[in-house]
Image (spheres, rainbow, N blue to C red):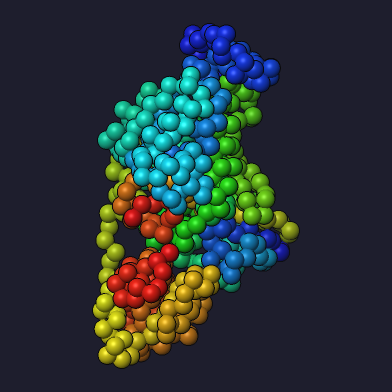
Amino acid sequence: MAVTILIPTALRAFTDRKAEVEVEGRTAGEAVAAFAGAYPDIRHHLYDDAGSLRSFINIYVGEKNVKDASGLETPVRDGETVMIVPAIAGGKALVRDSGACPDDTGRRP
Amino acid sequence: MSIISDRRLVALDNSEIPRYSRHLLLPEVGPEGQQRLKAAKVLIVGAGGLGAPLALYLAAAGVGTIGVVDHDLVEASNLQRQVIHSTRDIDRPKTESAKDRIRGLNPLVNVVTYNVALTAGNAMDILHDYDVVADGTDNYQTRYLVNDACVLLDIPNVYGSIFQFEGQATVFHAADGPCYRCLYPAPPPPGLVPSCAEGGVVGVLPGIVGTIQACEVIKLIVGVGEGQGLTGRLLLFDAWRMKFREVKLEKDPACPVCGENPVINELIDYEQFCGLTQPDEGMDGITPLELKARLDKEDPLQLVDVREQHERNVFAFEGAKPVPFGQVVRRMDELDPHTEAVFICKVGRRSALAIRALREAGYAGRMLNLLGGTNAWARDVDNSLPQY
Ligand SMILES: [Zn+2]
């Protein structure tokens, strides 16, 4: 099955800024694994050391979070989209010296 | 249904009628909705990119009491998007600047300022007085803090967040639907994107996302029908491709704070929860001065610049091989494991990320992180280079 992976901005540093790619897979898990296989730098950001999907990453098949379906076993149909939605936290720095992201523009030195 | 009960409605006096006439003309708002707005107390956490449109539109709409929490001063780099602050406000507390602007826009609003960082120690005291909280912060620990405090106090949390040119918005209200932890049980560990990628945000993005939050705040107060608010729906917005998408959000019965058997019954240590108190294990750093000394001695070193092309256009790091941090694993073969490698980025975060990724991918060579990145190099070694 050819499915389209929708890549969030936060992960486009690993995909040569591409916003979507086509991969093969019968389930959400297979599609995401194929995607991570094509861009190995992304693997560490999607999966933890045990190989589970990280808890700040959600995967949607269409409008549905796979957590609310069959997880990574959730089937995908030909032509369907698989969207990766990470937690993002931008807006405004409120805790000084958080160490979270010194590159952030909103943060004081 | 409105979150403001009928018994709290306050009559509008005649001087208020012209100001709010465009609301009064809408059957969905009308005099009753306007009275609810007048009675309502909304807390805005963060007077930055998201907080700016939130505060301005809520003030204009006639929200009776607006609280603003922020502990920062206005900086020049804020003005590209934080439209509540002006050039003359640089170096003033953001809360003061926001208060002046709200008062100028609508003197009928009671503005309460908190010029402090929101912490587990003060959050319950500050939040408990409010009907709605609008979260406009930019870090995970405050997001989880605001979420947990709102769940514990049963206050709806109107959520918005942004990254570069992408935004998310929803309403978390544990009484009616999911909370932030149902969606994301844990934040990214420090050093993993998106907790730490290059900064930058297109200035209008928080304007759009914060305005969506303001709209949802107003709807919670005025009251809308089932399915009309953003509860249970996550709105995703890509400003560059100008695309809105929407996905379903469901409550997690196992959620540690709003689930069936909650284990979080009070606020916790959010710095620790977000992994910010753990030292970075075993990564070797090198200061700009140490690197300069070794280069002068002509020590064999391979310099790897992991910044993006547009940053190298600001200036190239002399003698460094460019490998953007998102490609280091894919291009591992281009490095020589028998020569010590020094990784360079703007401030020393992405380079640390690159080292960690390479180590995990099995790279065997010795790796050093240039501490403080090119900014520190420009400060300590080569003043002719810009810090950006
Ligand atoms: Zn929850």
| Image quadrant containing the C terminus of chain B | bottom left
Please say whether residue A66 is visible from this viewpoint.
no
The location of residue B240, given as percent across then percent down, is 64, 55
Task: Decide if residue B312 is on the left or right side of residue A78.
Answer: left
Which residue lies most toward the right here? A79
Which residue lies most toward the front here? B88
Give the residue displayed 58% in from the left and 37% down from the top.
B212
The location of residue A29, given as percent across then percent down, is 58, 60
Q: Nearer the viewer, residue B121 or B39?
A: B39
- Give the total number of marks visible in the rendering: 0
Task: Decide if residue B267 is on the left or right side of residue B249.
Answer: left
Vertical arrangement, residue B79 with respect to residue B177, above or below: below
Task: Decide if residue B112 is on the left or right side of residue B218.
Answer: left
Vertical arrangement, residue B20 with respect to residue B215, above or below: above
Give the residue displayed 31% in from the left and 91% down from the top.
B298
Q: Nearer the viewer, residue B172 or B134?
A: B134
Give the residue displayed 36% in from the left and 39% down from the top.
B93
The location of residue B111, given as percent across then percent down, is 41, 25
Give the image quarter of residue B345: bottom left
Give the residue displayed 59% in from the left and 42% down from the top.
B208
Give the image quarter of residue B1: top right
